[in-house]
Image: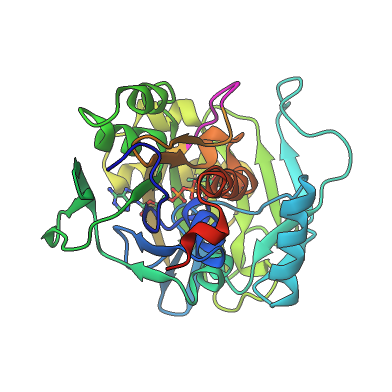
Amino acid sequence: MSRERVPRSVAVVGAGLAGLACAGALRDAGHAVRLFDKSRGPSGRAATRRGEGWACDHGAQYFTADDPQFAAEVRRWCEAGVAAEWTPRLGVFGDAAPGSRREGPTRRFVGVPAMTAPARWLAAGQQLLPQHTIDQLRRDDDGWHLRSAEHGWLDAVFDAVLLALPAPQARDLLGGVHARLEALAASEPMQPCWSVMAVYDDDPLPQLDAAFVNQPLLSWICADHRKPGRAGAPCWLLHAQPAWSHEHLEAEQPWIVQQMLGAFAELGARGVPRHAFAHRWRYARGALADAPAAAWDPATGLGLCGDWLCGGRVEGAWRSGRALAGEVLAHAPRASLAG
Ligand SMILES: Cc1cc2nc3c(=O)[nH]c(=O)nc-3n(C[C@H](O)[C@H](O)[C@H](O)COP(=O)(O)OP(=O)(O)OC[C@H]3O[C@@H](n4cnc5c(N)ncnc54)[C@H](O)[C@@H]3O)c2cc1C
């Protein structure tokens, strides 16, 4: 590839909110964009697990919208019926560390009918290839080549590859490919989070919708079935503290369930769940201090975006994706895409 060649065909690896926001902006500007994700569908950590008669958001719980552009995007989601404001009866157990909570009133939003809904809406009309776990990148004279664990080296060749992944997963792909971007990704290890979904016949804690928990084991509890637009059996979601999750990262799931349900009972939850499942988020949260919102090398056509580059959280993911698209477009004026 010649230096600073205008990218026309772009591969975005990762169809979470960062990848989708980035791919959508590039598609709207006339680029041919393909999105690859290792999962069966989009949305990444804004995730929902479904079972017989129940569903539960076991990753991101809600999102806020401080940035005016993201606030406008959330209004579009609400108008499309894929998000709604959530006004829970919110409790707090234990004392919060000073400065750890936002000051002033907070507007909270959730996907409707599930946290995956905004991502599915954004993915409509995009070229998304699920169940493609990209495990190697190679740049030849004709452009970028991608290999997936499921399909081997792919036929398509790309002018640009944009990694919209948690930092450690981006780092794994960048080894021997791009030293500066690899070092950037290596600088944010990200924190884990154990989550437990517990399905009940009778609501174990009807007096609360959700609570921040400032205790050594749990960090957050939420009556997922009472978020807007939900249906199904009472289902509570429990998140563990990062330090506890880290300490017990390799523990067996039944033990995790037992410990977290025990801590939930100590908060006043009654009864025994019909089903309970644990899910380990190895790279749940992370936010690199003083980072650029996105990283782009026009000389090689390689870029990085993701929540960890823009303050963490859903809002940061979307903003980072948009920022990377903006950088790519700055090197690819619309007119030069013709022909
Ligand atoms: C337990 C938990 C609680 C959270 N709570 C909140 C909250 O309340 N509010 C909030 O705003 N945020 C919350 N977050 C954070 C929020 O979920 C993230 O900030 C946001 O979803 C990140 O989006 P992303 O696109 O940057 O990354 P991701 O959503 O992680 O997307 C990355 C995508 O890349 C895919 N992928 C990974 N490796 C490969 C590969 N090799 N090849 C192909 N695809 C790959 C993944 O399948 C995934 O779809 C929470 C996260 C977790 C885990």
Residue at horizontal 59%, vertical 56%?
270
Res 307 seen here: yes
The answer to whether 225 is drawn above or below residue 161 in the figure is: below
Q: Is residue 257 left or right of residue 134?
A: right
Provide the residue span drawn in magenta. Answer: 285-291
The answer to whether 244 is drawn above or below residue 70 in the figure is: above
Residue at horizontal 67%, vertical 66%?
227
| In front of the other: 336 or 243 | 336
| In front of the other: 259 or 180 | 180
Name the image quarter holding the N terminus: top left
Res 282 seen here: no
| In front of the other: 259 or 183 | 183
Magenta stretch: dominant secondary structure:
loop
Residue farthest to the left, as pictured? 152
The quadrant where residue 302 appears: top left
Name the image quarter holding the C terminus: bottom left
Residue at horizontal 58%, vertical 35%?
293
Q: Is residue 315 magenta?
A: no
Report x, y in % for residue 278. Answer: 38, 51
